[in-house]
Image: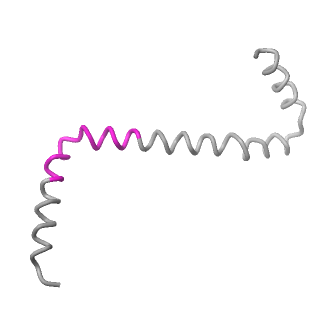
Amino acid sequence: MSRWWNGVELWLTQLGLALQVTLLMLVVLPVCWWAARALDRVVGAVFERFSPHHAVDTAMDAAGDAEDAQEPR
């Protein structure tokens, strides 16, 4: 594995700057975007779960939905 990675690193450093930037755009940026999206979902779920207002908001949403259902539109 180490020998393979050294070969890739050598190949990459010998490329011109334009090709290095192109590879960055095509490979690294999408990987970072997906990682950030996954981290955002995990953190959002944790904050939603452990928020002190979660139970109150849920109860108020249910009560608000019941009141909305009774009002004529």
Residue depicted at 14% across the width and 59% down the height = 62
Magenta includes 24? no
Q: Where residue 25 sits: x, y (%)?
A: 72, 46
User: What's the image's color scheme?
Assistant: one colour
Q: Residue at x 12, y 83 (%)?
A: 72
Which quarter of the picture shows residue 17?
A: top right
Q: Of all residues shown, which one is farthest toward the bottom? A: 73
Q: Picture quarter containing residue 18?
A: top right
In reply to whether residue 43 is colored magenta, the answer given is: yes
| Figure check: 62 above or below 7 | below
Instruction: Please identify the quadrant where the N terminus is shown.
Output: top right
Quadrant location of the C terminus in the rendered image: bottom left
| Main secondary structure along the magenta-highlighted residues | helix
- Looking at the image, residue 33 sits to the left or right of residue 65; the answer is right
Image side of residue 60 versus residue 7, left or right: left
Q: In front: 68, or 52? A: 68
Residue 64 sits above or below residue 72 on the image: above
Residue in the image at 78% along x and 42% along y: 23
User: What is the count of numbered marks?
Assistant: 0
The residues colored magenta run: 42-58
Q: Is residue 43 above or below residue 8?
A: below
How far from the left and from the top, in percent, is residue 39?
46, 39
Indicate the quadrant where residue 61 lies: bottom left
Residue at horizontal 36 percent and vertical 44 percent from the top: 44
The x and y percentages for residue 5 are: 78, 21
Left or right: 8 as drawn, with respect to 60: right
Q: Position of residue 42 (x, y in %)?
A: 40, 39
